[in-house]
Image: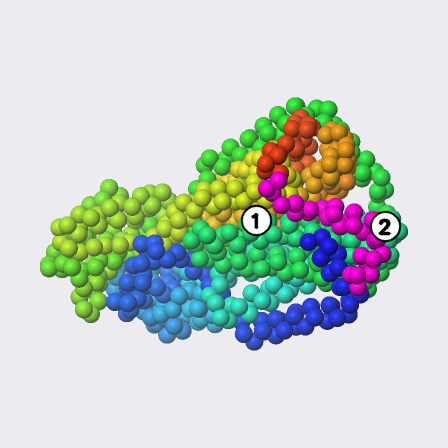
Amino acid sequence: MASFLYRLGRFSFRRRALVTAVWAAVLVALGAGALTLSGQLSNSVTIPGTESQKAIDQLADRFPEAAAGGATARVVISTPGDITDAAGQAAITGLVKGLENAPKVAGVVNPLQMQAISPDKHVALAQVSYRVPGFELTDADREGLMAAADAAKAAGYTVDFGGDAVQAMPATNATEGLGVAVAAVVLIITFGSLLAAGIPLLTALIGVGIGMAGITTASGFLELNTNTPVLALMIGLAVGIDYALFIVSRYRHELTIGRDPEEAAGRATGTAGSAVVFAGLTVIIALAGLTVVGIPFLGEMGIAAAITVAIAVVIALTLLPAILGFAGGKLAGGKIRLRRKENTTTHGERWAKFVARHRIPVLIAAIAGLAIVAVPAASMQLGLPNDSTAAPDTTQRKAYDTVARSFGEGANGPLVIVVDLSGSTDRQAALQQAAAGIGGLPERPIVTPPKTNRAGDLALLTVIPKSGPSSTATEDLVSDIRGLNAGLGSATGASLAVTGQTAANIDVSEKLADAMLPYLALIVGLAFLLLMLVFRSIVVPLKATLGFLGSVVATFGAVVAVFQWGWLTDLLGVKTTGPIMSMLPILLIGVLFGLAMDYQVFLVTRMREEYVHGADPQQAMVTGFRHGSRVVVAAALIMISVFAGFVLAESSLIQSIGFALAFGVLVDAFVIRMTIVPALMSLLGRGAWWLPKWLDRVLPDVDVEGEKLAKQLDAPDERELVDASK
């Protein structure tokens, strides 16, 4: 592979105009597709096969007039006075009429007719159902919904809106560009040159632009989740900058030792590019592996991010050498000297020697620190976002709080019970038994009168719990209601199922939680096999995967402390706390695995190279750390800064993903790879590189560092090899 990449790098360098034109054409074509073919992104989070989704499908087939799969909105009108007086009734009537005329509305439940008036008569609650799901609503549709309240607001009434019909699409904002700005500063410090620092940023932005344009174009043909482009942007920026950093660093090194620019580009692509390919493959496999957990929206997010990473790898191997061709030998030396190179090297060497001398205390301190940070992970509660997690100043959160105060928490998350009467001989008795059984459960929820379809073989019951949609009590209630199905079926021949937004969120969270451990096992097993191929060792992959698990658990603890317990929320700008997003743990495992293996490869392969060339284990660790630590530190700081920029986003999901990835990289790079790994390598000595002879014969030599290429190029017939590559 290294020889192929060497030839590819030289080709891209020589044909730089052609390579650049091809990538420019790809960017323009996909950009045009994004402008003309893009579709609406989806807020829906569904998993086929769950009870709630089966019930929705059943309603769509046999009870379409119920619009059960459509978006819903809760409209809360309140006043300090009596909402039921003549003026209040007129305001409610006008509001309902306006809501009925709003775009795509299927029906409105009038609070005066359904007695949805708070006991103190200050608040009325109207329910709006739509003919289409929430992700199909446009901004104009939402504006039409909001405009229905203008007359009531002008009359002095307060009107707020909740429900999935008013959930805005998560979007990036300018503050997330701070991460890129910090990355630029890190690159300038690392390279000491504005030109050298600008090239990784340029190629990363081109890669992200192509990836995002492709995702936007695909949205015109596929139903994509709203968080899909955000994850792709986040990962694509980070790895795009890092991969270019590794190759540019090697290119500058080749220039400083006297190589001509074309040869330097070829060698940099063949050596550092090989490591980039392997590192990229680990990230791609981890992200694409999200498809095996059986959760469609999570799989699509993983595939989109994996494609963006693949684009970053290909750009690093082709467009980057082409751009280096335009720069030529100008990157040989930096003109901005913020600090001396030898000082940076000395710091890395001093740290490695310090860790080697005090390896036992360092190991104990690092492991104890990870354990302490991981403690909150034992209290992790998973859930999906709802109006209670919206920012306090939003209309969704105001509507949620008003409903909770006036009608109880459960009014924000009603359950929909679908009763299939087709197998019952006495349908009325079956409905009565179902309603009585639900009303008689320990929580004593409110059960509304049933609605039946035209055929009379399917009925709907609305159940209002006393607890909120994210509470464990509501989860228990859903489980208890589902537990009534067996008895109802044996007694009447009917069956029931629980659906609605609250039940669907519970089902999705449970499915995600169940998928986490199998996915983690898949990733850990994959990590062990890949690292065994690279390092030709049993011990190194074992400690690498155990270190990965340590960084994951510690990150879980930090996420729980901030986003569930509320620690440091003011400092980080987190406006609301609550259950951890159900998809976050699996996403974190997949992404952090790939990034952790990046650092493992770039740091430990140099240690292995020194050891294979005859250095004793202690010296190999110190020398390898000295050469690899600087680029790993720079890469980690870039990753952290890019991810941390997303903590400033408005969406709590994007905030939690950005924080988790930034903290995870921080822990894995500086605690695991830069502290625990050298301490263990020093402690284990030659035992770190042990591999059974029979396994050594079986395993292929992937030559990630391109040692064979270097030997070929430095051999006496180097000129012939170079000529043959032209």
Q: Inspect the image, locate mark 2, and give the three-letter code of the amino acid beneath it.
A: Pro
The residue beneath circle 2 is: 716
Q: Is residue 437 left or right of residue 159?
A: left
Q: Quadrant of the N terminus?
A: bottom right
* Residue 384 makes an appearance in the image: yes
**Residue 601 location (% of width, % of height):** 66, 43
Residue on which disc 1 sits: 591
Q: What is the span of residues highlighted in magenta in the rendered image?
A: 697-726
Nearest the eye: 313 or 137: 313
Asked if the stretch drawn in magenta spans residue 707, the answer is yes
Residue 435 in the magenta stretch? The answer is no
Q: Residue at x 17, y 47 (%)?
A: 487
Give the vertical position of 418 relative to 678 (above or below). below
> Measured along the vertical axis of the image, is residue 358 above or below residue 348?
above
> Is residue 203 visible to the viewer in this orientation of the structure?
no
Camera-side residue: 349 or 705?
A: 705
Give the image location of residue 182, x and y in percent: 71, 51
Amino acid type at image mark 1: Val
* Residue 657 x %, y %: 55, 49
Name the quadrant of the C terminus: bottom right
Give the secondary structure at mark 1: helix
- What's the residue at 45%, 42% (across, down)? 517
